[in-house]
Amino acid sequence: MFSLLRPYIFSLDPETAHDLAIKSLKFNIIPETFFKTENEEVLQTKLFGKSIRNPIGLAAGFDKSAEVYNSLFKFGFGFIEVGTVTPKRQLGNPKPRIFRLEKDKGMINRLGFNNHGLEEVLIRISKDLPKGILGINIGPNKETKDKTDDFIKCLEQAHINADYITVNISSPNTEGLRDFHKKNSMENLLNRLTKLKKDKKILKPIFVKISPDIKNTDISNIIELVLKFSIEGIILSNTSDGTRDQLEDTQKNEHGGLSGQPIKTLSTKLIKNFYKEVGKKISIIGVGGVDSGESAFEKITAGANAVQLYTGMVYKGPGIVKEIKKDLISILKKEKIKNIGEAVGINA
């Protein structure tokens, strides 16, 4: 059905198409059986201190204000991440702010953390409890002077409604946010977050979402701090504000974060480099160009415990999760691997 609708969907402005998708998903009428496949048990794995049915997650950015996560679980995702959520409601940057790069199977966005705000999101989740593993991606408001304070506010309240929290320090669309990759800034942020966890007895795991545009010399510093403060995981990676030279689409120079196929190799290389240093001491979620079983397996064998996608679903529709599951099951059978967890890092 998506293949029939795609020409119409792609004739719309990307943000209009996205808003239409959110409105359609609110009806929650698609049967979950559409997206099941055989032998899924080989994809079960552990993450966030829990057992998840498969390692395929939906990245933050699609369900920014936690409006349709239970409908999305029906597509077969092993976990879903909503957000980025900021303490106060935020409109984001001026439109247009999303651009499809169809020739490159990528997207550029400069949304700027548009969302309904922490209070409304948490009320929404408490009234419609998640039917699967739900993460909340948190970030600061654009006008906030001390961005660390906003992260603290979000963690203090959002952990109650989440299975895990993602600290987003890597969007290229909020001025100064990526400064948290600097050692002193990251140390201060992680110190305050872990102190809050200890003081408030917060047990939910924290993941930090990293930029793909960091230098190789930054990796050791990030790992040192993540281990020092017992951060449970990292997400590799967010969108890139570089990587444009080889692109063909005429919109390739739009300002914003690049996602999809154009950053696949970049993010996989980053996963390998982190895994080589950190091994199995923390969990890694791989993001960037995941749109098939092969691309998911590539990231898992590079060192990712799980993967997330978003742009892939824009181009392939909701059936992408079932397609990836079927492909992964076939790959595991071919490689004589009994469970997806055994594949983590084997090609790192």
Image: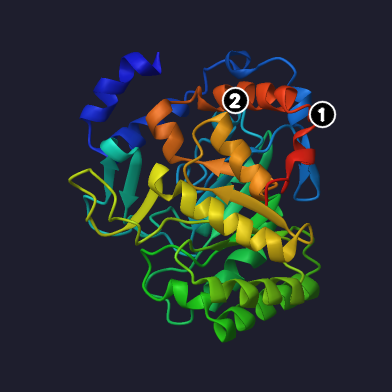
Q: Where is residue 97 in the image (x, y as percent from the top left)?
A: 26, 51
Work out which residue is located at the far left of the displayed protein and give it: 250
Whichever of callouts 2 and 1 sits on the residue coming sooner in the sequence is 2
Which numbered dot is residue 74? 2
**Residue found at x 44% / y 35%:** 312
Label 1 sits on a secondary structure element that is: loop
Helix, strand or loop at mark 2: loop
Disc number placed over residue 338 in the picture, else none: 1
Along the line of sight, the residue nearer the viewer: 186 or 252: 252
Task: State left or right for residue 194 relative to residue 75.
Answer: right
Which numbered mark, 2 or 1, is in the foreground of this view? 1
State left or right for residue 337 relative to residue 164: right
Q: What residue type is labelled 1?
A: Lys
Label 2 sits on what residue type?
Lys
- Count of numbered circles on the image: 2
Q: Position of residue 330 (x, y in %)?
A: 67, 21
Residues marked 2 and 1 touching at CB (< 8 Å): no
Within-10-Å neighbours for mark 1: few <14, some 14–19, many 20+: some
